Image (tube, rainbow, N blue to C red):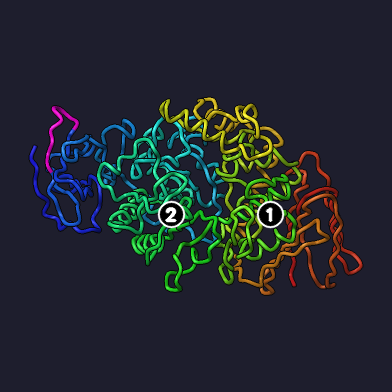
Amino acid sequence: MSNQKSSLTITASSLLGAVPSESGVLFRVWAPKAHTVEVVLEEGSHTAFPLEEANGGFFEGVLSTVKTGSLYRYTIDGKGPYPDPASRFQPQGVHGPSQVVDPRQFHWSDSAWQGHALKNLILYELHVGTFTPAGTFAGMMERLPYLADLGITALELMPVADFPGRRNWGYDGVSLFAPAHHYGEPDDLRRVVDRAHELGMSVLLDVVYNHLGPDGNYLEAFSPYYFTSRHHTPWGSAVNLDGEQSQHVRHFFIENAVQWIRDYHIDGLRLDATHAMIDNSRPPFLAELTERVHADVKPREVVLIAEDCRNLACIVTSVNDGGWGLDAVWSDDFHHEVRRSLAKDKEGYFQDFSGHLQEIATTLKKGWYFSGQPSVHFGRPRGTKPDDIPLQRFVFCLQNHDQIGNRAFGERLNQQIDPASYRAASTLLLTVPETPLLFMGQEWGAGTPFLYFTDHHDELGTLVTKGRRAEFKAFKAFTDVASRDRIPDPQDPDTFRRSVLQWSELTVDPHTLLHRLYRALVAWRKNTLTSMPIEHGEFTATVLDDTALRLQYRRPELACYEIIIQWEHEGTHRFPIKAEQSWEVVLTTEDPYFCNDTHPIRVDRSNGELTLQFLRPGAVILKTHL
């Protein structure tokens, strides 16, 4: 086997890792403090081949006889060997050798696929390992027709970058370019995306650029510049986005984002905890990443979504207008208001919210509630005004992995409030202009929890268990050690097993009936709301008698819609109407098709009034022509 120097011109924008080409495999790694870097091939006698130093601290070279599927590692100044920081696959786990992968060998069938515009997204968040009993990409693919039938337009996968152990949420990922080997091989993920596109669904991926996990993170063996002690995060030293050599660190993460979209045809990224990415540079990293990704994928519709608790309008403001240019942002205020109101949560960040319908209505009209007001939880003012930001740029949810899994016992909202209120809240989520996100199993009121689970080595695992339980000591229910010891151990395999969806629930009531309601609401949204361009002023949300919400979509040239949501108790609401107005009931949450203990909602038109009478929480969708 010979080591041949590449005839390619290597620049800072070149691909990282092991890249197959016509002349062999190009190996390229950033190790700016190294004197020597060698590729060590795992086959045979573990032959080592030196790479040549290039500008910027990169080492590179083409090995002409290395093939797709070959296993390799790197040594740095004789130390190691270490897996490739940009490994495309770790078949033996994050501590094992890296594998050469050629994405060009996969035969795609989605050449005509263009993706979905933001306004058409109905997101469905899922965790590959617990979505099906198999816990694999192949198992997930079997359920894709179900999701298409539900009406979902975009899957949102929790992180799949490889992590230590067999089970993990994915936020402890360390091999950021490599799909988790316990979920399957890289082509298994490609098959999922290809099939999803065939069924008309986009696929978004959660990526974590604010930290790496503590086990299997070899970045510092290659460069001392990946992390900086100048900034700190809850996970330790921050990723170096604005210090010495940060341009190469930024390139590493941008290349990772582009890889998922280029090599896996991913339709968008959800960027985890961008508030923990400390960056004082200009332009900021997120703006640079956004510009690069959008430029590389035209004309495909690719969506970048930030998870960020700061409520900063600049996140979704265009780069030309001084913003970061992301397409959307998770808006937790909606979730917090709903849980404060219905589940009565009031500790932690819920203390900032009243749960009053007026606050919920304000959040619906603005996209978030906090826009500069003082926050008790954060101890400072929070948020900026979201004036003129299109409402579809805000992602709303009733549940997500954090808001279920970060509860001590992983309870879902449907397990904590009455079914009528859950149907009403579900209707609200799917009839507002903001982009809705469902969490797996939400649509049938899954009875399984979603718990926090890990599979670290014993020493680290013990620390994780202790840390998990210590997180709750400030909460009233867990002030003593005995109560905290009841919190499920993340390291216990049963904690993981309990979190796996039970698909048999779908075949029995009331799960079947709730699933029908979700299908109907999703269909209404797709057929009506996503085709109706919503501008500020054409959607209104008002409070009725402090017990109900009235949503109105007023487009005189189109059919107009009103959604009345009785939020709590019973209630009667009357509206004056014109004699020539026609009214049609699209659906109610008390229809026998959706509910087996129905309390019919009375809708009556007489004497110039439209009267709606609710006997308990519920919702009605009405269609009219002005």
Whether the residues at callouts 1 and 2 have beta carbons within 8 Å, the answer is no
Secondary structure that dominates the magenta span: loop
State which tag comes first along the sequence, 1 or 2.
2
Q: Is residue 527 left or right of residue 26?
A: right
The residue under label 1 is which amino acid type? Phe
State the residue position of label 1. Answer: 353
Q: Specify few, some or many for label 1: CA neighbours under 10 Å numbering under 14, 14-19, or 20 or more.
A: many
Q: Residue furthest right?
A: 607
Q: Quadrant of residue 514?
A: top right
143 relative to 610 in the view: left or right: left
Q: Position of residue 280 (x, y in %)?
A: 40, 62
- Taking depth in this image into account, of 522 and 30 the one nearest to the observer is 30
Report the side of 86 relative to 130 (left or right). left
Q: Which of 35/442 is in front?
A: 35
- Name the residue type under label 2: Met
Q: Residue at x 65, y 34 (%)?
A: 478
Q: Mark 1 and mark 2: span between their CA atoms? A: 26 Å
Q: Could one spot residue 298 in this view of the protein?
A: no
In this rendering, would 591 be left or right of 198?
right
Quarter of the image for residue 88 reads top left
Q: Quarter of the image containing the N terminus?
A: top left
**Element type at mark 2:** loop
**x and y, in percent, of residue 140 in the image:** 47, 38
Looking at the image, how many numbered discs can be counted on the residues? Answer: 2
Which residue is at 65% across, 29% downward?
Answer: 483
Q: Which residues are magenta?
A: 42-50
- Screen quadrant of the C terminus: bottom right
Above or below, 425 relative to 282: above
Please provide percent x and percent y for residue 110: 38, 52
